[in-house]
Image (cartoon, rainbow, N blue to C red):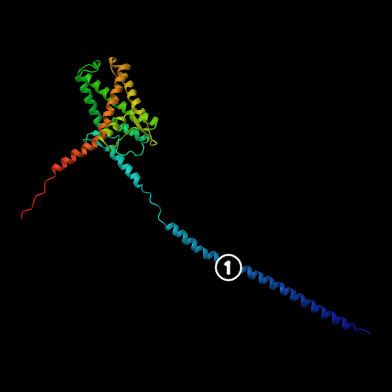
Amino acid sequence: MKVNGRFFLILAICWGLCARTGLAQNAQSTISTEVNAQQQQSAQTNSATQSEDAAKPETSNQSSTQSSKPEPSKTTPPQTRQEKESEKKERSDRMLGVLPRFGVVDSQDAPPLTPGGKFHLFARSAFDPVSFGIAGLKAGISQAQNDSQGYGQGAAGYGKRYGSAFADQASSSFFSNFFYPVLFKSDPRYFRLGQGTFKHRFGYAFKQEFVAHTDRGGRTFNSSNVLGAFSSGALSNVYYPQSDRGIGPTMSRAGYALAYGGVGCVVNEFYPDIARKLFHKRKKDQTPAPTSREQ
């Protein structure tokens, strides 16, 4: 059976058209797949952008809330204010309005003094105007009793006695209130007991000349007072007359200084009680009695 050549030509054309149609379909499916992928990717991108946009207001709100929060005020704590007020009161406290009581505290738990505070206590105690008057009084008594005869009499003798008395006070305050307390980390102030029987408080007060509060809150032997008295007594050998120099006079001056210090502690312990009773009674006496109304 003969096959016409046109038949093969038509068959080839039909085959080519079918193949082209299949390729077109494959290409179309590929293109549609790519388009779908791009659409999904763009949709994901849009959703991520929307979520970021939604999160931005919250972040801005949080930042605005944080910025709108008031900063904590840098005010002084009440305890620090009370401590400053008590320190201010200590610095201005005077016995009978005249004699300084700068180194006396009414609380057993008072904060310790810094080295600067100890130096300030020394300076206030040594160079207070009353200290100059006390030195003058000591010099007058010494001249009247003709102590330290090497100084002589008259204005020159009084001037020398005045200088030595003031130097004794200043050196004693330097060693007992500043130098040794800083060295041994002790507190040079007197801590009042303020309660208890008279006997107990009297013994406590006199004992404080030899018992010191440490900067850490403990108790220790008061080396500052003892060494301060002997150091001041030894230094006085530089400016005292030849007849008042040596170990004997030095020990005597140190002993007197410690004895006077013990008496001073007793006075500091009981003076507020005496003043309270004395001035409170005086105020009561000065208060006018209520007058009865006439009927």
* Number of marks in picture: 1
Give the farthest residue toward the right: 1
Q: Classify residue 36 as left or right of residue 244.
A: right
Residue at horizontal 49 percent and vertical 61 percent from the top: 59
User: Quadrant where the C terminus lies?
Assistant: bottom left
Name the residue beneath numbered marker 1.
47
Q: Quadrant of residue 20?
A: bottom right
Residue at horizontal 53 percent and vertical 65 percent from the top: 53
- In this view, the residue in front, 132 or 37, is 132
10 Å neighbourhood of mark 1: few (<14), some, or many (≥20)?
Answer: few
Residue at horizontal 16 percent and vertical 40 percent from the top: 282
Please tell me whether residue 261 is drawn above or below residue 67 in the rendered image: above
Residue at horizontal 30 percent and vertical 22 percent from the top: 255
Q: Quadrant of residue 272?
A: top left
Residue 219: percent from left, percent from top:
37, 33
- In this view, the residue in front, 184 or 5, is 184
Residue 191: percent from left, percent from top:
31, 35
Give the farthest residue toward the bottom: 1
Please tell me whether residue 98 is drawn above or below residue 12 in the rendered image: above
Residue 233: percent from left, percent from top:
31, 22
Q: Quadrant of residue 145?
A: top left
Q: Classify residue 63 as left or right of residue 97.
A: right
Q: Which element carries disc 1, helix, strand or loop? A: helix
Q: Classify residue 35 as left or right of residue 260.
A: right
- In this view, the residue in front, 35 or 101, is 101
- In this view, the residue in front, 56 or 69, is 69
User: Quadrant where the N terminus lies?
Assistant: bottom right
Please tell me whether residue 35 is drawn above or below residue 290 in the rendered image: below
Residue 180: percent from left, percent from top:
37, 28
Kindly identify the amino acid type of the residue bearing the numbered disc 1.
Answer: Ser
